[in-house]
Image (cartoon, rainbow, N blue to C red):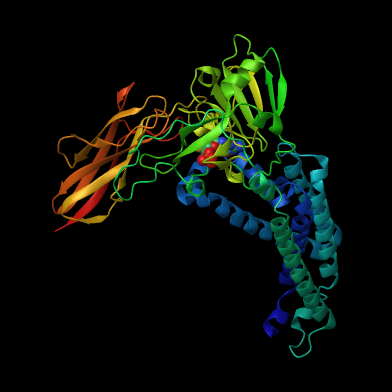
Amino acid sequence: MKTFRRLPRSVLAAAAGVVSAGLLLGSAELVGVWFRPAASPLIAVGAAFIDVTPTWLKNFAVDTFGTADKAVLLVAMGAVTAILAALVGLLARRRWRDGAAAVLLLGGVLALAVITRSGAELFDLLPTAAGTVAGLAALRLLVHRLPPPGAASASDADPTPSRRSFFATAAVLTVAAAVLAASGSALKGVRGGIQEIRRALRLPAAAVPAKALPSGVESPVQGVVPFITPNADFYRIDTALAVPQVDPASWQLRVHGMVDEEFTLSFPELLELDLVESHVTLACVSNPVGGELAGNARWLGYPLAKLLDRARPLSGADMVLSRSADGFSASTPLEALRDGRDALLAVGMNGEPLPLEHGFPVRMVVPGLYGFVSATKWVVDLEVTRFQDKTAYWTDRGWSDRGPIKTASRIEAPRPFASVPAGDVAVGGTAWAQQRGIDRVEIQVDDGPWREAVLAAEASIDTWRQWSFSWRAEPGRHYLRVRAYDSVDGLQTPDRADPIPNGASGWHSISVTVEP
Ligand SMILES: Nc1nc2c(c(=O)[nH]1)N[C@H]1C(S)=C(S)[C@@H](COP(=O)(O)O)O[C@H]1N2
Ligand SMILES: [Mo]
């Protein structure tokens, strides 16, 4: 405590700035309970940052931090906030008016981030406004209580009264900021909101149920992923820093653009339609060779082909630009939505309403296309247009405007760098070539001949296909390599390609040690 009291005045001023920033954000958090997540200034700034991040930095972040990239972003933002806040405190120490102007300026930047989010309303500025007022008041209180210049040398035993009152005020305000923020997030939890609505929702049964899975779709090898990916384990990829909270009661899908008949569809109207169910394996274009950004689920939804038939696209249109409630967009070839494949406006995933993070209440699922050009979550708008007229979110950031899924195969068991006992070793994995189907998988040990793996049953050409292979393993270090054949293009290409701009390619290999 004594060392505290000897702190120079500038440090106290910087601390005043940081405490005030805490109060700003804490107040905004509490007021934000009654608003959508993107009305929270911190979330809005993060989201805006994600949208303007150059592609190389985004790729670096994803490569380095993987799915923790969002957490890392939040921590970095906290650090930047603290530094800016400290500078504001120092400004305010010199001249109160400069400090106040800086707070208002930063409040303005936060407001700009909030209001430029997709779907933002003027009303959404309230949390930021309330926070800015609270932050300003806190800074005023603290700066007023800064000890007079030179007081830093006051004797330890007798800190000046203003010093004591500065610390008391700072302590009270710090506690207040923490209480505001904590009660804000607690209230958000209690209100439950969309999560509650989702839990209470009962989806209708499918008018056309999914084709029954043949027996033996799963590889018998232990360590291979389940054929149906449980919702909780399904990979999640999106640009949303906070999961969008879309209320089915107010959800609408607008279908418009180059069509004869524009219309909007409500959620109750959608559930009235004849829904179909289909097993489809989704894959992310960012998935590296051997990676885990793919999942297989049973989707319930309405065929997009029928929806488009109702709108009657004009000739010349060749693309549907789908947009989400949070400003993401994807360009899907019109052809892929009308050629008879199970392209769905989906509401259900493995027998439940879509989980919030997988697009509740409505998303798109299109077999054969990477998610970035087809699988729009929280979808609210379909515009029939032309590739030459419109571009989508990732296309504007250096990725391709089209994204058919490339044939892929991976070894899941044994794990890379595993040690296994010599003798018969069960090797297994998964391969996919949506819309084409896998009809052969081969394994190579070191530089030996390619040998055929045993394929598990095929559920459909739109789902992944598992395989197994019995390996007579000799002691030592070995490389296992896999390659698949699809029924249209034959052998999977050995050419290595990075994910950007339209998906990775190449054969997956792993190294394992066989113990004598
Ligand atoms: N609204 C929205 N939808 C989106 C995305 C997004 O960033 N925002 N990402 C897409 C990408 S790149 C993929 S791979 C899939 C992933 O779907 P999942 O998270 O349900 O696995 O969602 C797609 N839909
Ligand atoms: Mo993706």
Q: Nearer the viewer, residue 338 or 514?
A: 338
Residue 424 appears in view: yes
Q: Is residue 447 left or right of residue 326?
A: left
Residue drawn at point x = 60 percent, y = 55 percent: 76
- Image position, residue 57 (x, y; %): 52, 43
Residue 398 appears in view: no
**Quarter of the rendering containing residue 504:** top left
Q: Nearer the viewer, residue 80 or 378?
A: 378
**Quarter of the rendering containing residue 395:** top right
- Image position, residue 466 (x, y; %): 33, 38
Image quadrant containing the C terminus? bottom left
Q: Nearer the viewer, residue 115 or 203?
A: 203
- Image position, residue 351 (x, y; %): 54, 41
Q: Is residue 297 left or right of residue 384?
A: left
Q: How many marks?
A: 0
Q: Is residue 1 left or right of residue 465?
A: right
**Quarter of the rendering containing residue 410:** top left
Q: Nearer the viewer, residue 304 or 376?
A: 304
- Image position, residue 437 (x, y; %): 36, 27
Residue at the bottom extreme of this rendering: 157
Q: Is residue 423 above or below residue 54?
A: below
Where on the image, by quarter, is ligand 1? Answer: top right
Image quadrant containing the N terminus? bottom right
